[in-house]
Amino acid sequence: MLVLSAYDISSERGFLPSQDPVRYLPAALSVWDEYAYALPKLLVSGRIRHFLRQMPVLDPTPHLRTEGEWRRAMQALSYLGHAWVWGESTPSDSLPENIALPWYTVAQRLGRPPVLSYASYALDNWYRLEPEGPVTLDNIALLQNFLGGIDEEWFILIHVAIEAAAVPAIQAIPILVEAYQTQNTTTAEEALSQIAGALERVYAILLRMPEACDPYIYYHRVRPYIHGWKNNPALPNGLRYEGVAAYSQPQQFRGETGAQSSIIPALDAALGIQHADDPLRAYLREMLEYMPPKHRQFILDIESQKIDRTFFGRTSALKELYNTCLHWIERFRTKHLEYAAQYIARQHQLSVTNPTEVGTGGTPFMPYLAKHRDETQAHQIR
């Protein structure tokens, strides 16, 4: 059976870290915390690059001792890097060595590209208001912001709460995979029932997005900072990482996107949901590179089982539960598509740096999201 702990997946927290995210770096690297936590003030000045130039070039390797510290360093440098690129009226196609070099070093250690990804933006970006309380929307707040404000907080915290609510579904995946391997329909029914219940709760949290995240504010004050530099019309040649010998040419990395969450790809694999071999599928494969490596391996190991969904038609109860799981994934994807239209596509584009036709991951997101939904619907067992 797949063992969640072998993939850095917590039985209590799922893809969220098993220990609460580290809030502060060791003293030798505290300047990164100082500037990162000051971003809501520094960005308003309109001259963020003037301030970030003042940071020294630091080597993080001798000072970072725990996984949590490495992840906080990645988070701080990711926010500083994106603030440098997107924080003034004209984007910068070159990143100075004092950010680029340590960012590359930390990214190499964590097995992810030096760009802001979902792991730093959401998985590692929270703390509990009551330290002994649950990871729920009424008990979490963000560690790190760009501009700050309730809309930015709520947008990211919805994702964190979804990760926490999905835990029972993640717990059930190894059970479901083993049930498929042994053709045990009774165990499969129990696992699918647990997945369906979790997905219903996940969907209920997603519905809460408009409560405190306004589409206009999201588009104009939250979204501009999370774009990447691949397939981005504002940075067609990518970004130069000064001082990084391994990068002799400008690099192109995709921006932060919910497609970098491991929840839905893991469930797609466990439920035998296939996506057609086209540019969208290639994009989904590329998103694996932005996930923590062991989470990525979890998805790949489930996929290696080549689960055939016809197994889920073996009994009427199994078929009903399978279709219920697909129903909730389809509703999730449909709502995501509706939000994409409301929060992005229908907004008024003011600059090439924040396009309405291209997602933060650098894709034509509207047809992609619609295709996700349609392919999920097509897997219902009749």
Image: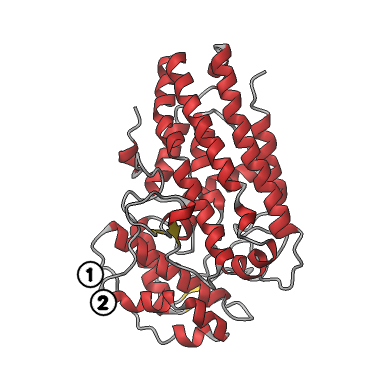
Quarter of the picture holding the N terminus: top left
Amino acid type for the residue under numbered disc 2: Ala
Amino acid type for the residue under numbered disc 1: Pro
Which one is nearer the viewer's eye here, 124 or 248? Answer: 124
Which one is nearer the viewer's eye here, 208 or 98? Answer: 208
Residue drawn at the location 53% of the way across and 30% of the way down: 196
Label for residue 150?
A: none
Residue 126: horizontal and vertical position, in percent? Answer: 42, 59
Number of the front mark, 1 or 2? 2
Q: Secondary structure at mark 1?
A: loop
| Figure check: 379 above or below 115 | above
Q: CA distance from mark 1 to mark 2?
A: 9 Å
Residue 312, image quadrant? top right
User: Few, some or many C-alpha atoms within 10 Å of disc 2 (few <14, some 14-19, many ≥20)?
Assistant: few
Quarter of the picture holding the C terminus: top right
| Figure check: 285 above or below 62 | above
Residue 294: horizontal and vertical position, in percent? Answer: 37, 45
User: Few, some or many C-alpha atoms within 10 Å of disc 1 (few <14, some 14-19, many ≥20)?
Assistant: few
Which one is nearer the viewer's eye here, 37 or 256? Answer: 37
Residue 166: horizontal and vertical position, in percent? Answer: 47, 40
The residue singled out by tag 1 in the image is 62
The residue singled out by tag 2 in the image is 28
**Residues at marks 1 and 2 touching, judged by CB atoms closer than 8 Å:** yes
Q: Is residue 361 left or right of residue 28?
A: right
Q: Earlier in the sequence, mark 1 or mark 2?
A: 2
Q: Secondary structure at mark 2?
A: helix
